[in-house]
Image: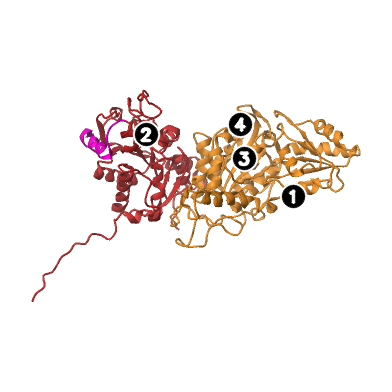
Chain colours: A orange, B red
Amino acid sequence: MHADPKGVLTGLHFMDGDHAACEGAIAAGCRFAAGYPITPSTEVVERFAARIPLVGGVFIQMEDEIASSIAILGAAWAGQKVMTVTSGPGLSLMMEHIGLAAMTETPCVFVDVQRAGPSTGLPTLPAQGDMMQVRWGSHGDYGIIALSPNSPQECFDLAVKAFNLAELYRTPVFLMMDEVVGHMTERVAIPKAEEIEVVPRRWTARKPGEYKAYEPGEDLVPEMVKAGDGYRIHVTGLTHDERGYPAMNPQAQDRLVRRLVEKIRRNAHKLVDVRGDHLEDAEVVVVSYGITSRIAAAAVEEARQAGRKVGHLRLVIVWPFPEKVVAELAARVKAFVVPELNLGQMVYEVQRVVAGKAPVVSVPHAGGTVHQVDDILQKILEVAP
Amino acid sequence: MSSAAINLELPPLQNPVMKYLRQDRIPHIWCPGCGIGTALNAFIRALDEMQFDLDRMAVVSGIGCSGRVAGYLNVDSFHTTHGRAIPFATGLKLGNPELKVVVFSGDGDLFAIGGNHFIHAARRNMDLFVVCVNNFTYGMTGGQVAPTTPLGAIQTTMPYGNFEPAFNLPYLADSCGAVYVARWTVYHIKQLTRAFKEGLSKKGFAFLEVLSPCPTLYSRRNRLGDGVDQLKYYKEKSVVKNGADTREVELSFQGEIVVGKFVDRERPTWLEAMNEHLSQRLGLRYQPYGVRHED
């Protein structure tokens, strides 16, 4: 299915990442957004509020992030493609509804324009400190998908992809931006509507009476209906059976929660999106994502000019973590270097998958600005033979 | 030989409310003497009398004893998180404006953890019918003090009696802009059923407070007897004052209960206001949202 031309601003633009993410959402079919102002993410919803009346949809500024994060779930069950947009403190407030979205398998997109924390931290300055929070932040076990753009162009492209993945897997999907990517202005090429692939909701073809709201398909994802279709569905955050009815026992818990995790884990091979540079002959691999990947790329080029066999692996989909790709590299390279705008988060994932086959070196940064190329280069030179 | 015609009036084979319930979920979890079932019964009677199209409505609940209402009704129903039924319902309504969206939840859920959402939805005149079953306590968690607990009442977290003033719910709803505000008790079945019909028919933010006994955790702890004793209290101490000034309908421990329809007025809903405003500002570039276009 292709994008509705009504929402697509085809052409070349000079646009910041926040605006580009908004355009990606609209192109993907998002017609309902709820949000609460928070730096540095607000421009996404400001643009949505201006654009959506002309496209045929609704924006509502709710009373807080808690309300925003559940209003979108209500709208999703009315049949809409939905998103909310926030940054650190707001994301912390949304955690309970990320769990509700995962538990009720509600397709939705959370845009997180990361700023330095904890708490109020540095509201106007970048960080990548929410990477573990989006994976593990709500209580209990569930799977999610997270994407990490490194340019305004990718904010557009990956916003579209985030909506598509939310529909395919019926799970919350996170667009993990940061302040620099959000506020950086660059060339953004928006394709023609017919060139933008859009995944529709997985509506059931079954009739009321034959349909069970939480009966999974082969890929472990159930088909969906919406309120008002005559199916008389019940949707609850309680542990539930295939009818959607509360089921208060360990067997139902095991069956449901295992599936919520497995539907991402078992499909993880379809969810690999990485970019490799100079990996063929690499003895050292820099693993990075988001804004940090642009500095890492410069460090890798300098190291190669200095004669070091260094490669670069950029994670575009960060969650699920591309275990197979990293494990294959671990079998043949001598070391990994992991720069990120936090004091060590995704580096633990790299270490887990490398499993002692090679040293994994962190290049931590507390946030507030980005790394210097030299910070990363020095670490490369320390480990590169 | 003539046979006398025997006119036997057979009772209906099934209680008329049963078809509105998810019968595979009965029995319910509510205690003997609890009033939530009575409130639900009155709601169903209202739907039945109105012949309401059940495929054009959705019920949303939060968490707690009253939060279980959604799960028993045979309509599209959503059991959400604690305190957040109203913002979920807001999204549902705006996602599909043709749905009648009813929020059915308890006093702790709607007015403590969910209080912020209540006042803003009323301020916006979001087109929702919000029903609060007020039993003065947190039943599901074992009888803790609520923002509605009368002064002096004993609760597990106010073991020496409550010293926090309670919300006057109709006054709160009225002052925040609700277009319909009523209060009845589960003793007043007929009036309650009529109020449900009015709330279901009202466009905009309608609020109905239903006083209901919690014999297990409120009455017992305060030595007020069982559910029937609470109904007797409602019967003896209720005074009907339709159109009463909501500032004067405050409740007190076992004191007078002013019941009636207090507010019934008109103002544009959030969606109507948005459509009108954007049509003025954007002219023909704007196509009103959620308005069915006859082709």
Image location (x, y in percent) of residue B103 = 40, 43
Say if labels 1 and 3 share a chain: yes
**Mark 1 — on which chain does it sit?**
A
Which residue bears the numbered disc 1?
A324
User: Real-space Cα distance between discs 4 and 2?
Assistant: 39 Å
Image location (x, y in percent) of residue A3 = 61, 53
Mark seen at residue A135: none
Q: Residues within 10 Å of mark 4 (few under 14, many from 20)?
A: many
Query: Please, what is the three-letter code of the amino acid marked with disc 2?
Result: Thr
* Mark toward the viewer: 1 or 4: 1
Q: Which residues are magenta?
A: B222-241
| Sequence-first disc among 1 and 3 | 3
Which residue bears the numbered disc 4?
A39
Assess whether mark 3 and mark 1 are in contact (beta carbons under 8 angstroms).
no
The answer to whether residue A269 is visible is: yes
Quadrant assignment, res B62: top left
Which residue bears the numbered disc 2?
B137
**Mark 2 — on which chain does it sit?**
B
Assess whether mark 4 and mark 1 are in contact (beta carbons under 8 angstroms).
no
Residue at the image point whose x is 58% and y is 52% from the top: A259
Query: Please, what is the three-letter code of the amino acid marked with disc 4?
Result: Thr
* Vertical comparison of B27 with B245: above or below: below
Which residue bears the numbered disc 3?
A136
Q: Residue furthest left?
A: B1
Query: Please, what is the three-letter code of the amino acid marked with disc 3?
Result: Trp
- Between B199 and A99, the residue placed more toward the observer is A99
User: Real-space Cα distance between discs 2 and 1?
Assistant: 53 Å
Is residue B1 toward the left or the right of residue B10 in the image?
Answer: left
